[in-house]
Image (cartoon, helix red, strand yellow):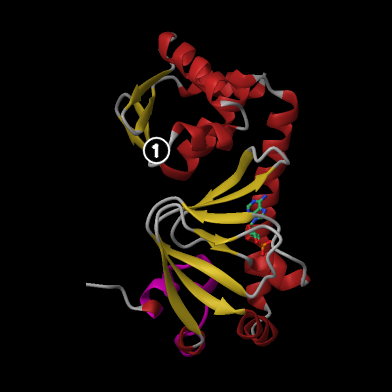
Amino acid sequence: MKEKPDTFLRKVSLFADLPDEDLKKIVRLTRIRQYRKQEVIFYADDPGTALFILKSGMVKISVMDKDLREVILKLLYPGDFFGEMALLDGQHRSATVTAMERSEAVVLDREAFLSILRQKPELILTMLLTVCRRLRQTDEKIRSLVFADAYGKVAETLLRLINEKGERGDDGVSIELPFSTKDLASLVGITRQTLSKVLKEYQRAGVIKMLRRQIHILDEARLQREALS
Ligand code: CMP
């Protein structure tokens, strides 16, 4: 059975503390949109017209350099919002957002979103906390991109994925990877060839085990050391 929009929005941390009545009002202002795997939800530099809250699936936030090399800034999962920046500062979209698998999003138009923020300023604080967390993660990513070698960059990305979607078992942590090695390379910020070399070396050293669409982390402590070095 499909989840009702207000049942879903109640679980979204942004709206968790809102009284039922306010949440119902917000639900009336939203619509649901579906996206196919690989469908672009919007491009960097598009004008910003709506806020999105991911209901199911997964999306990537990415930017391209002039040779169309992609860097994935962040993966987002159900309950995460995106598209707030262009709505708040009135500028164009700062990055491209693409569905990595079949995805569904709750969409709130700009005017409705701004009017809710005016009526419920406490939402601004909640939103700001998420934006601060993302900025910290981006700072970490910049540090890794600038200072770490390929082993450190891969280690940093794997540790982040463990945090976001790792499943702990008796002999380590498993990370599902429902995307291509090209995407994983864009997430790390290195070429596919370098990624493949590093993963092979980590596998040889017993740090990870590669399975189809899954990476099993056997030695998390080693990844932590690599990420810091
Ligand atoms: P907006 O600029 O409207 O469109 C792109 C969206 O991607 C942006 O809003 C944020 O929601 C999100 N975004 C942009 N940069 C980052 C980042 N560094 N980390 C996480 N999310 C981001």
> Does 8 appear in magenta?
yes
At a point 43% along the width and 36% down the height, the residue shown is 180
Q: What stretch is highlighted in magenta?
A: 6-23
> Does 194 appear in magenta?
no
Q: Nearer the viewer, residue 59 or 126?
A: 59
Secondary structure beneath label 1: loop
Q: How crowded is mark 1: few (under 14 residues within 10 Å), some or many (20 or more)?
A: some
On-image quarter of the C terminus = top right
Ligand 1 visible in quadrant: bottom right
Q: Mark 1 points at which residue?
A: 177
What amino acid is found at the position of numbered circle 1 in the picture? Leu
Q: Nearer the viewer, residue 139 or 196?
A: 196
Q: Nearer the viewer, residue 153 or 92?
A: 92
On-image quarter of the N terminus = bottom left
Q: Is residue 17 visible?
A: no
Q: Residue furthest top?
A: 204
Q: In this view, does 109 lie above or below 142?
A: below
Q: Is residue 217 visible?
A: yes
